[in-house]
Image (cartoon, rainbow, N blue to C red):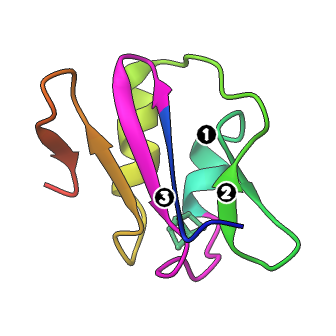
Amino acid sequence: MADQTERHISGTMVRIDRTLCIGSGNCTNLAPEIFEIKEDAIVDFQDETPDIDRDRLIESASVCPVDALLVFDEDGEQIVPE
Ligand code: SF4
């Protein structure tokens, strides 16, 4: 599995840095349609990542304790982490 993966979701670009994730599950609790803890106990995207409420998506990335989730807006400006 790649160390970093990206998806376009809900008008944003979401990036997972799997080298930082500690498998806390904060993101999967808030956005289970998007994130999944894999067999190696590290998060990755679900196979299919539907558009969800944008605020919930942003919050699900914001609650990562190790800043493993980055979110960028349409202009490439970083939204998460602030
Ligand atoms: S919140 Fe962060 S550390 Fe926790 S599972 Fe998600 S990406 Fe990994």
> Is residue 63 found inside the magenta-colored segment of the image?
no
Q: Is the Cβ of the residue at disc 2 closer than 8 Å to that at disc 3? A: yes
* Relative horizontal placement of residue 58, taking residue 60 as reference (left or right): left
Magenta range: 8-25
**Of the two numbered discs 2 and 1 in the rendering, the one whose residue sits closer to the viewer:** 2
Residue 53 image offset from top left, x and y in percent: 47, 18
Which of the two labelled residues, at mark 1 and mark 3, occupies the earlier sequence position? 3
The residue tagged 1 is 31
User: Element under label 1?
Assistant: loop
User: Element under label 2?
Assistant: strand
**Of the two numbered discs 1 and 3 in the rendering, the one whose residue sits closer to the viewer:** 3
From the viewer's side, name the closer residue of 8 and 22: 8
Ligand 1 is in which quadrant of the figure? Answer: bottom right
Q: Is the Cβ of the residue at disc 1 closer than 8 Å to that at disc 3? A: no
* Relative horizontal placement of residue 63, taking residue 27 as reference (left or right): left
Q: Is the Cβ of the residue at disc 2 closer than 8 Å to that at disc 1? A: no
Q: Residue at x 42, y 68 (%)?
A: 68
Which quadrant holds the C terminus? Answer: bottom left
Residue 16, label in figure: 3
Q: Residue at x 39, y 22 (%)?
A: 54
Label 3 lies in ligand 1 vicinity (Cβ under 8 Å)? yes
The Cα–Cα distance between marks 1 and 3, rounded to whole angstroms, is: 14 Å
Label 2 lies in ligand 1 vicinity (Cβ under 8 Å)? no
The residue tagged 2 is 44
From the viewer's side, name the closer residue of 37 and 3: 3
Quadrant housing residue 18: bottom right
